[in-house]
Image (spheres, helix red, strand yellow):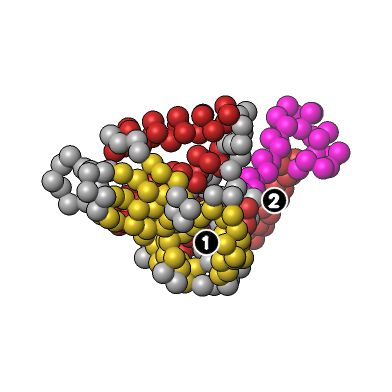
Amino acid sequence: MKKRNKAQRVALLGTLGVLLFLVGSCVLVLFWAAKSEDSEIAESIRKTIGIPEPEAAQPASVVPAQQPVIADPQQNESAIVAEAAALPEITFKEIAAQRHLWPKELTLKLAVRVPIRYNGKDYGFMEFSKGLPILVDSLSAGGEIFCRIDGNYLSLSVYETDFYGWFKQKYGDRYDVQPVVVDMGTKATSRYRLGTEKGEAAFWAEMRIWCHQNYEAVTLIVAEDGLVFMWLPKEDAPIDFALEAREVARQFLLKRAKYGGRENYAACEIRNPVTNELLGESSIFIPRL
């Protein structure tokens, strides 16, 4: 009796084991069928028992690697240009109005050898070598540099000197200097020419008007060796008569050139119109005329 009961229990356990194995196998098959995407059998099982199709796996988002930033040389150059352009501009006219920006000394850029001409006559040559030191007296708004070379007073164009190189070296970090539009008073010419009645009359009218506006005197004599300007100042303020004599000579040369004159040198004396006392004298040479 006992042996028979034992046999029954063994058979029951075997049956349970087989059932558990079958159930586990079914679960595994169903799980495999639910997840498999590339098996026709799994697809058939899903359709038979109504298991939904597996969702397609979402690809992992790919973050592109950042490329190293390479500086554009043109952008760097543009930045440099922009920085340079940010400097305040300054013109030669503005420089001429600010004495603290004037150079004390410059040099000639080119050799100069020009005949000395006054009142229709040539008086030899004046010659200066390239690189010769120039002692600067003053600047004019029109692009002239008044200077001394070996004791001679000259009016030079800014472009006849190394002014721009000097200015950029000394003030290039503060100003963006602009090229001067040269107007030396010789560009404007008259249709009347010296040597004709109308030309002589027009020149002397213009010269006397200038003298009257600046000195309230009009007596200017063209002597053989130079000009004589009769002027007695009304004020008691100190006056540099040599400087005034150079300006009279300069205006004489520039206005003569306007009417076709060839003079480039003139000396001038300023004398008291009452006593004929010599008050001051000087001369000026303008090579470009």
**Residue 38 in magenta stretch:** yes
2 and 1 marks in contact (CB < 8 Å): no
SS type, badge 2:
helix
Question: Residue 156, how many percent across, how many down?
Answer: 50, 56
The residue that appears at 76% across and 32% down in the rendered structure is: 46
User: Residue at the spot x=41%, y=44% of the render?
Assistant: 221
List the single residue furthest toward the left. 236
Q: Tell me the SS state at disc 1.
A: loop
220 in relation to 118, above or below: above
Question: Which of 126/109 is in front?
Answer: 126
Q: Does the stretch in magenta take in 277?
A: no
Most frequent secondary structure within the magenta stretch: loop
The residue where tag 1 is placed is 161
Q: In the rendered image, is residue 189 in sight? A: no
Q: Amino acid at mark 2?
A: Phe
Where's residue 89, x and y in %?
43, 45
Residue sitting at 34 percent across and 35 percent down?
218
Select label 2 or label 1 by which is in front. 1
Q: Which residues are magenta?
A: 36-63
Q: Viewer-proximal residue, 218 or 98?
A: 218
Q: Is residue 123 left or right of residue 48?
A: left
Q: Which residue is mark 2?
A: 21
Figure quadrant of residue 192: top right
Three-letter code for the amino acid on which mark 1 is drawn? Thr
